[in-house]
Amino acid sequence: LEVWKSGKAQGFVNEKECQEIVGLTEADQKRRASRFKPGLSYFIPSLKIHKLPVETIKPGCDIPARLISSFQDCPTKRSDIYIVDKWLKSLEHDYCTDLVQDTNQTLIWLNELKLELEEETTAKIIPFTFDFDALYDSITPELVLEALEHAMVNTRSAWSKEFRDWLLLLVKLSLTSAAGMFRDQWYLQIFGIPTGGSLSVQLANIAVHYAMRHVVFENDEEHRGTKAICRRWSRYFLGDIGRA
C-alpha cells in the first residue's frame, strides 16, 4: 500500500480510486473486505507433446512441459488490472505501432501491402517469420522497465518524471511479487516475467517493440537501406498468452 499512498499524496490517484482499487481508507489503513485479499497464485504445466518424435509417442512416455504461471489472484492483482486499463493499454497501442493482434490482421495488412506496391516490387519480397524462444522467460524485468520508460518518454510527454517513476515502481512491485504454488510448494519466479500475469501482455509487447527497434530497425551506415525496408514492411504479434 505504500506505493499507492505515495501516489495519492502526489495526486496521481485520488481518494476514491485508492479505496475502490486497493482498499486504502482515508486514514491510510487497509480495508479487510475479501475482495481486497489475494487469492491463490499457481503454476500449471503446459504439455509440449508436439516436440516429441512421432515414434516415441506412446502411453507412459515423458512429455516435455513448460510451467505457465497463473497470477490473476496475486497480491497486486487489483492494482495491476487498474494500471493496465487506465495507462498501459493505450501506451502499448501508441508505442507498438507495428503490432497486430492476430493472424486475421496480418492477412489484411499483407493484402493492403499487395495493393499498395507495384507487382515488380512484391515479386522481390521474400516473406519470413521467426519465433521467440521462451519469450516470457527470456524477458528480464530490467529490460521491461527500460522499455517502459522509453515508451513513456517518447509517447507521453505530458507525464511528469515523478509520475513515470511511480508507475515504474508499481510495475516493479508486480514483477517482484511473482510467486506461485506448484505441488503444494511455493516458488518465487526468478527468471523472466510471468506468463499469466495481468500486466504480461502489455509489458511483453512494449519490451519486444523496444528491443526490435534498437536491434533490428535502428538505421546505421552499414545497414541503413535494409533496416529501413524491414521497418517499413514488418509486423509482429505475440501469441500463446491470454490476459486474465
Image (spheres, rainbow, N blue to C red):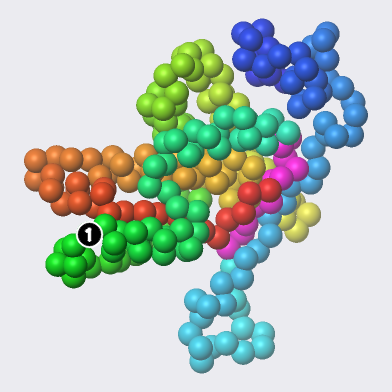
Q: Is residue 205 above or below residue 51?
A: above
- Left or right of 103, for residue 40: right
Residue 165: percent from left, percent from top: 51, 19
- Left or right of 116, for residue 111: right
Image quarter hosting the N terminus: top right
Quarter occupied by residue 22: top right
Q: Front-most of 50 and 183? A: 50
Q: Is residue 72 magenta?
A: yes
Residue 6: percent from left, percent from top: 65, 12
Give amino acid for label 1.
Leu
Q: Is residue 107 above or below residue 42?
A: below
Is residue 80 visible from the viewing direction of this image? no
Label 1 CA crowd tier, 10 Å (few <14, some 14–19, many 20+): few
User: Which residue is disc 1 drawn over?
Assistant: 117
Residue 215: percent from left, percent from top: 27, 44
Q: Is residue 133 above or below residue 87?
A: below
- Left or right of 185, for residue 122: left
Residue at 53%, 25% in the rendered image: 168
Question: Residue placed farthest to the front in the image?
Answer: 115
Q: Is residue 181 above or below residue 157?
A: below
The magenta-colored residue range is 66-77
Residue at 38%, 58% in the rendered image: 109
Is residue 78 visible from the viewing direction of this image? yes
Disc 1 is placed on an element classified as loop
Residue 149: percent from left, percent from top: 43, 27
Residue at 9%, 41% in the rendered image: 221
Question: Residue placed farthest to the left in the image?
Answer: 221
Q: Front-most of 11 and 142? A: 11
Residue at 42%, 36% in the rendered image: 95
Quarter occupied by residue 167: top right
Q: Is residue 3 magenta?
A: no
